[in-house]
Image (cartoon, rainbow, N blue to C red):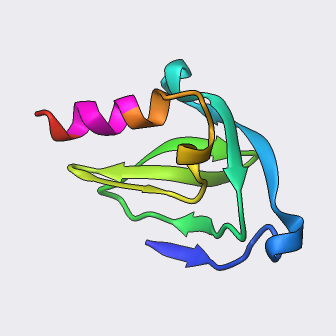
Amino acid sequence: MTVVRNFFGGQINSSIQYIAAEDKRLSSRQYFIRAPIIKDCGKEASVLATLGPSAVAVQQNHLLATVFHSELEDELSWLCHFLRMVDK
């Protein structure tokens, strides 16, 4: 995976953004704090969510990578997705 650090800017540029996901249950508001952006995730990984044209969450088998802080949001869809992944 290739990422670009601090893609959205430094700490002062932190924001809450709406992300789009193929699985509509994962489309939600998320916190971006000095967040990187995923430029490339390879052929084996699946992009789970985007912000505009950029990937912000990817999964490959039992590995999950996100560039946002889902733990700061009251909405639990990403936690539930992770728990479904590890329960297999």
Q: Quadrant of the C terminus?
A: top left
Query: What residue is shown at x 22% (from left), y 49% (from top)?
Result: 61
**Residue 7 image point, x, y percent:** 74, 72
Residue range in magenta is: 80-85
Q: How would you classify the magenta stretch by its main secondary structure?
A: helix
Q: Nearer the viewer, residue 12 or 41?
A: 12
Q: Is residue 58 left or right of residue 24?
A: left
Is residue 61 one of those drawn in magenta?
no
Query: What residue is shown at x 40% (from left), y 36% (from top)?
Result: 79
**Residue 29 image point, x, y percent:** 70, 35
Q: Quadrant of the N terminus?
A: bottom left
Res 63 quadrant in image: bottom left
**Residue 27 image point, x, y percent:** 61, 28
Q: Nearer the viewer, residue 39 or 73?
A: 73
Q: Is residue 29 above or below residue 17?
A: above
Is residue 84 one of those drawn in magenta?
yes
Q: Is residue 77 above or below residue 5?
A: above
